[in-house]
Image: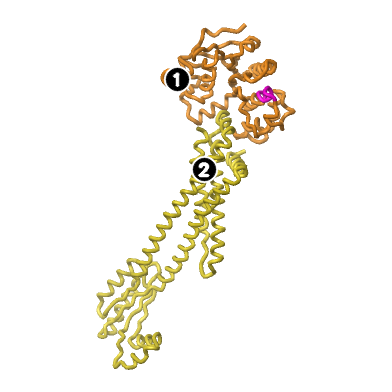
Chain colours: A yellow, B orange
Amino acid sequence: MTVIGYAFEEALASLRKSGRSALVSIGTIAIAFVTLGGFLLVSVNVQDLLDRWLEAAEISVYLTDTASEADRMSVEAFLKGRPEVVEVEYVSRERALERFRTDFPELADVTGSLSQNPFPSSLEVRLRGDDAGGASAETLAREVTGKTGVADVQFDRAWLSRLIGVVTSARAGAAVVAAILMLGAAFTVGAVVRLSLYARRDELEIMALVGAPFSYIRGPFVVEGLLLGGLGAAVALAVVGVLYYFAGPQFRFLGYGEMAVMLLGGILVGAGAGTLASRAAHR
Amino acid sequence: MIETVRVTKAYGREEYGVRDLTMKVEKGEFAFLTGPSGAGKSTLLRLLLLQERPTSGQIVIGDRDLSTLTPNEVQAYRRTVGFVFQDFKLIASKTIFENVAFVLRVLGQPVEQQRRRTYQVPKWVGLQHRHNAYPLELSGGAQQRVAIARALVNEPHIMLADEPTGNLDPDLSLEIMNLFRDINASGTTVLVATHDRELIKWVGRRVIQLDHGQLAGAPGTAS
């Protein structure tokens, strides 16, 4: 029998015997991982929202009334030559007024009373999603400001950058909370493994005396931790699935990658705690 | 061959398990280790099994100095040593078969070999009909025979026994000693710690006498 087969066989037998303490341990890990899973779920959905906003991110380049056709063409050519720019649309003064009337029909009286069109012509620039909130968009906005015929540049995406900053901080905070909970879960796994170790102390003494390899002495406890961690994470994944079911279909569930992170995380936390606890097995 | 060269095991400043002990047991020999309680018999056996390390001195088994062994080498060395204790050290929750098979299982032996050896060895000690019994269902003598079967199952070069008859009546003690004689006859070096002089006389092998952790006199042969 290989050491892996032996370790799994013994670990499963030990889990069956430890019953309630194993369930408590799985429950503790599940709580930690439900927090992590919930955080991941919120995170992927917030990220989706940000991505959508970023995709729609635009820079408006307002032209002076005196800008010539050549000035406009030159600015347009400059913008189109930039890799982060997806599309450049020219909005004439007439079209801008028309748009305003369509968007704000209740203000039709105001625009009707005007003797001349107050709206400037502009170039609306759509940026690639990944660059829109970043530094290159800001640089572009700054560079185009100095071009002949440009009156003003409106880059409203600064608030989006700030929002990304807030989301990033919130993520870091949630990661710290998840790490603390996982540490607690690891301690619980360690305690359960130490209980198993105590329950099998007679066997361990014999194993040490007959010269059993350390992999045989410690292996079952490492595997026990691994199984506790993996089962806890799997339970957590199921709970997050149920929560998602009740939250509604407008949200997205975790992708395979995130689910794998949770399961592997559980396995690693459990195996790590089991490995540390198993050091006492041959002392 | 088992050899100790000026071996001392100190517990604190003034207390010694063994002190400056030099002795030798030849390969294939059967020897007794005797002396009053506290003479250092058990300490010496623990040192030979590397359950403890000597404070000073050298223990040589075959041609290897035990003090140089790494933890993995200690385990490998222990695979060549069988041990029997006064309190049997059987696992109460396992049957006789499982207690014996356990050793081969944790040494990673193939299942077929585990089964073959585990059926074979209890026959030598007369327990072939009690495979499925649990240790506590057996008499003290039978439990000690299981412990001997377990010690034999991995074909050790050396057999160490610490007061193996300490919990047994004289008839059972003789029975156990006969087993040790058979084991020795098959080429295994046997070192038995006991303070039972009658038993030593009956078996009639070399005696290493300890007193306060030291050799009490030149080793002689019991009549």
* The N terminus of chain B, quarter of image: top right
Asked whether residue B6 appears in the rendered view, the answer is: yes
Q: Answer left or right for A82 relative to B170.
A: left
Q: Answer left or right for B115 relative to A88.
A: right
Of B121 and B171, nearer the camera is B171
Q: Residue at x 51, y 43 (%)?
A: A190
Q: Residue furthest top?
A: B223
User: Which chain does the residue under circle 2 lie in?
Assistant: A
Q: Residue at x 46, y 52 (%)?
A: A181
Asked whether residue B62 appears in the rendered view, the answer is: no
In three-dimensional space, the C-alpha distance between marks 1 and 2, rounded to whole angstroms, equals: 35 Å
Disc 1 marks which residue?
A: B10
Do tag 1 and tag 2 residues touch (Cβ < 8 Å)?
no
Disc 2 is placed on an element classified as helix
Residue A191 shows which numbered tag? Answer: 2
Q: Is residue A21 magenta?
A: no
Q: Amino acid at mark 2?
A: Ala
Report the span colored magenta: B139-145
Q: Amino acid at mark 1?
A: Ala
| Residue B20 point in image, percent of width and height | 45, 14
| Residue B37 point in image, percent of width and height | 54, 16
Disc 1 is placed on an element classified as strand
Q: Residue at x 40, y 85 (%)?
A: A103
Q: Residue furthest right?
A: B129
